[in-house]
Amino acid sequence: MNIPGLHRELETMNMSRHTFLLNMYGAMFDAMGPSEWWPGQSAFEICLGAILTQNTSWGNVEKAIWNLRARDLLQPGELFALPEDKLAELIRPAGYFRVKARRVKSFVHFLRREVGFDIGSLAEQDMDALRGKLLQVKGIGPETADSMLLYALDKPSFVVDAYTARICHRHGLVPSDIGYDELREFFMDVLPPDIYLFNEFHALFVRVGKKWCKKRNGLCADCPLFSFF
């Protein structure tokens, strides 16, 4: 169906959202500076952190990773050979350590099957196809998969979370009940596929969400995004 002016209207709306989002980005960046995410000395360590950070603070993840680094275990082959119960004890600081040990094991088994532990070669695969494969790994959900793609493998896959949804809803960009994939697609459709932009944008949303845009009693008057209401 071809409705005169519809394409132009949708294009204008998309451009407006594009400008609005980039202005939000600029306001947050100017107020807080670069986030320098995601910490990690290798792609595998970043992927490991993405699994361990589920339902816990990053400080706890750092303790778990330190335990592994102190024993030279930050390699997929080493963790593949390590008994699951010993892995669980080492990552205990990250919480849910038995569950997370199984998830880490599932991931390293995937790496063995898919690329023979050569995680760098994952970056050569098509992003959407690889995302589908990661989502088939037990314990890897959409946010974890996108974090691996963006931060470890330099793929332009936008990461969203509860902070992203809350901030965007409060600024009238998305409905309150928007799902993960729909929210991700919103950013993927409106913004250019720029790895640095996606990286920093997600990090800035998290920082604003933690400091100002709280679930209850948001500190709106002091928020860098206050002028966007």
Image (spheres, helix red, strand yellow):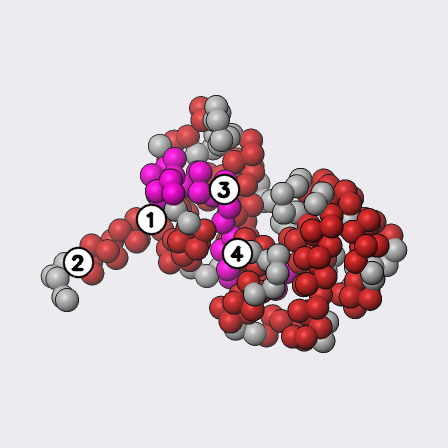
Name the residue rendered at 14%, 58% in the picture: 5
Whichever of labels 2 and 1 marks the residue nearer the N terminus, that label is 2
Q: Quick one: quadrant of the N terminus?
A: bottom left
- Reading the image, the residue beneath label 4 is 142
**Residue lying furthest left:** 4
Kindly report which numbered mark, 4 or 2, lies closer to the viewer in this rendering. 4
**Residue 36 seen in the figure:** no
- Answer whether labels 1 and 4 touch (C-beta < 8 Å): no
Q: 139 or 163, which lies in front?
A: 139
- Mark number for residue 214? none
Query: Rounded to the nearest whole Å, what is the CA distance between mark 4 and mark 2?
Result: 33 Å
Query: Rounded to the nearest whole Å, what is the CA distance between mark 3 and mark 2?
Result: 33 Å
Mark 4 element type: helix
- Reading the image, the residue beneath label 3 is 162
Name the residue rendered at 56%, 45% in the picture: 203
Name the residue rendered at 64%, 53% in the picture: 50
- Reading the image, the residue beneath label 1 is 17
Mark 1 element type: helix
